Image (spheres, rainbow, N blue to C red):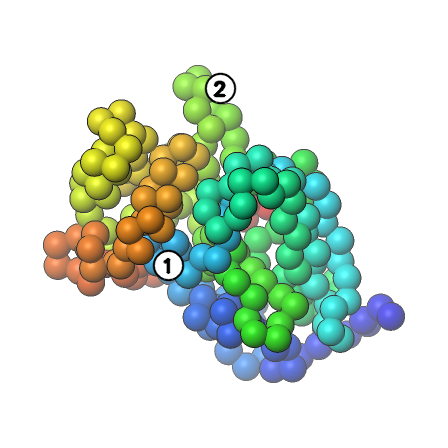
Amino acid sequence: MRSSIPAPLRRVTILAAMAAALMVPAGIAPATTVKPMNIVETVQNTGQAFAGTVASVEVVQAHGRWAEEITVAVTDPIFGLDDSATTVTWRQVRLAEDLRLPSMPEFHPGQDIAVFLYNAADGSPFRAPVGLDQGAYRLVRDPKSGQLIARNGHANRTLTNGLDVEKLATAARKAFGASAPVIGDSSTVSYESLKATARLLKSQNATVGAFAAEGTDGTAKSSTFARPARLFAE
């Protein structure tokens, strides 16, 4: 049954897993404030991380609510998946059939992506990328370098916010060798460096304090999230 009037935001159940990333005022707001998350915070909150190609996106009803059902053909399980996994499907909530949740990443069939997914909250059929569009990356081949570049919905602005990138690089080289790809402080991040850093942090069960920049507690505190970027949907 088609929804003609968007349901009031107060009636939409936001998952417990998403609540930490999304702070929504009463009523339908024109913008959404999202808790900034760096790569350490993202990995800490991720149940499954993988790269692949979007196979299908369908708007469906689940448990009386509207959602987008996304299926991705997995090409590279980063962590949390069996190496034999070929697809991942999840449902992320919508406000109504024709109204998306602000800051929720928008996927299209054929996109090459890397995703860091929350586990579903107990009893819930819904999931979402960690930090919403902070946890979903478009993968595009750089025509000059040939590198696969990863860019999330906020142009990677908080990927290393609050972190000491030299500590990250040193840990990556110690774990994977001197030629290990490392994340720098630039918004241009290769997929290989994102994957290597994520696997390193997961294997060490790393905390933000372990890689905190001097004078910080290691958490992201950027204030650039009032108006989400549209980069991911383009």
Q: Residue 211 at x, y = what percent?
A: 21, 52
Give the quadrant of residue 146.
top left
Q: How many neighbours does mark 2 have within 10 angstroms: few (below 14), some (14-19), or many (20 or more)?
A: few
Which of 95/41 is in front? 41
Residue 128 got which mark?
Answer: none
Which mark sits nearer the N-terminus, 1 or 2? Answer: 1
- Location of residue 12 with respect to 103 vertically, above or below: below
Q: Is mark 2 on a helix, strand or loop?
A: loop
Which residue does the image show at 72% across and 49% down from the upper left? 57
List the residue tagged with mark 1: 44
Give the quadrant of residue 188.
top left
- Location of residue 45 with respect to 124 vertically, above or below: above
Q: What element carries label 1?
A: helix
- Location of residue 70 with respect to 118 vertically, above or below: above
Q: How far apart are marks 1 and 2 (CA)?
A: 33 Å
Q: Residue 72 at x, y = what percent?
A: 64, 44
Which of 161/48 is in front? 48
Tell me which amino acid carries mark 1.
Gln
Determine if residue 228 is in view: no
**Which quadrant would the N terminus be assigned to in this image?**
bottom right
Q: Residue 84 at x, y = what percent?
A: 59, 40
